[in-house]
Structure formats: structure tokens, C-alpha cells
Amino acid sequence: MSLYLPFISRAPRIAVIRLQGVIAPAGRGRLNDATLAPLVERAFRRHKPVAVALVINSPGGSPVQSSLIAARIRRLAGERKIPVHAFVEDVAASGGYWLATAADDIWLDENSVIGSIGVISAGFGLHEFITRHGIERRLHTAGRSKSMLDPFLPEKPADVKRLKRLLEGIHENFIAHVKARRGERLSDDPALFTGEIWIGRKGVDVGLADGIGHLEDRMRQVYGDKARFMRYGVRPAFLRRLGIEMMDGAVDRIEERAEYARYGL
């Protein structure tokens, strides 16, 4: 049982939430709302933190999960009246930047990659391959729009048009969210919402971030030299901590490396 002495000032506590990895609804090491919910709730509620700091290193991923995670952070920040700060490490791109906008201010390293405000969809076309090997694709649907962009059939212009309409809708939502969170801090750079990326100070110049700064130095400038940090993050699976990885986990890691490689990382 601890003794409470009201005349003794306590060191301010800052909850640090680490958001590292690809954003996806499932998969080992993926960031998603279901996995992060209890962690984020604890960070805001335990020990009455004076602030929450997000440490972000993510190339993006699912727009829905990005939105859900950011919305949870904003809800708790409003309920608890706690300021939120974001610190970008290697990258906060696409959905990773969506997470950063959950903060009241965003800080970068000189070499951080930021931006990529756009939406992407990728796949493969295997119809020629299966034809060469004597494989016939049989597909039956009820509803003319039930099948779209089947990788085992030739690409249809109508399907591509539908997909672009969907991507443009998500892109519009992304742009609206960034404008709502960053407001007048955004520049009028015409490349801002094209999917372009910026490095360090260039990201500050276009208004996607507020300055160059690192977690502990910046937080002690704001909350004092005695500030204490309480760290929260998703723990890796037990076998991965032992250096053992199952096949599906290895595939996840390969996909994750491909996502980071898009930004030269």
C-alpha cells in the first residue's frame, strides 16, 4: 500500500504507444483495432498520464483499420482531455500517416518518410498462365456484379472502372480526414494529395508535420525534465522472440518487407 502525500509533487507520466508494422485486419505483427484496443485503452487510463505519445513506424495498409485506430485514439483523447503527440521514425506513409493525424502535433526525424496520401490496389493476372497449362476457369454467379477482377480471367474494362471508383471514394475520405486534422497547417502544394512522399523538413514545409523532434527530448521540453515514460506496444509472438518462425509468419514478414521497400526502406 503506497502512502499518498499531497504536498509531494509527482513526476508527470507520459504514455508511449508504439505503432510499428503494416496495418491489416489479420496476421502476425499486424496493426489493427482489435489487437490495439486494450493496449490503447490502458495507455490513456492507467496512472493518469499528462500526455500520450504515438511512436509510428508504418508503411500503411488497410484504410478501415487505420481509421478505426485513429478514431479510438481521438475518442479517448477527448474523453480524458489528454493531448496526443506523434513521433515518426522511419516512415508514416499512407495509413501510417492516417495514424499520425490522430495526434495534435506530428514530429519527424530529419530522415523520416511521410505522406503518400493516396490509395493503392495491386494483384496478378494469371489467365494466360493457366491457359498454357490446359487449365479451364469455371465461374458461375447470380448477380452481374458479383465477380470483379478475377485473377484467372482476362481483365475487364468495366471492372477496372468500378475499382477506380472505389479507390477514388476512399481517397476522398482520406483527403477530407487530413484536411480536418491538419487544417490551415497544410500548404497549397499541388502534390500534397497525389500520393507523393516527403523527407524530414520537406514534410514540415508542406504542413504534414509540425517540426523535427525526437520523443524524449521533445516531451521533456514540454512536460519537464522529470517526465517519466510508460511504454505500451504489441509484443511479438513467443516463437518469434526465440528466433523461430512458422511458414505463415515468414510470409507475413516477406509481405511487410515489400511494403517498407516501396519507400526505399
Image (cartoon, helix red, strand yellow):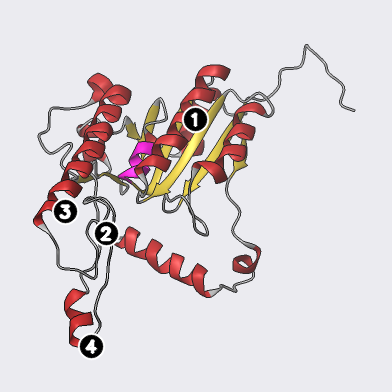
Q: Amino acid at mark 3?
A: Asp
Indicate which disc, 3 or 4, sits on the residue closer to the N terminus.
Answer: 4
Q: Amino acid at mark 1?
A: Ile
Indicate which disc, 2 or 4, sits on the residue closer to the N terminus.
Answer: 4
Q: Residue at x 56, y 73 (%)?
A: 246
Indicate which disc, 1 or 4, sits on the residue closer to the N terminus.
Answer: 1
The residue indicated by pointer 3 is 159
Residue 262, image x and y in percent? 27, 59
Determine if residue 81 is in view. no
Q: Amino acid at mark 4?
A: His
Indicate which disc, 1 or 3, sits on the residue closer to the N terminus.
Answer: 1
Which numbered mark, 2 or 4, is in the foreground of this view?
A: 4
Q: CA distance from mark 1 to mark 3?
A: 36 Å
Q: Residue at x 35, y 42 (%)?
A: 63
The residue indicated by pointer 4 is 133
Q: Residue at x 36, y 32 (%)?
A: 101
Q: Looking at this view, is 123 or 153 the one in front?
A: 153
Label total for image: 4
Name above or below for residue 7 compared with residue 238.
above
Determine if residue 87 is in view. yes
In the picture provided, is 40 more to the left or to the right than 61? Answer: right
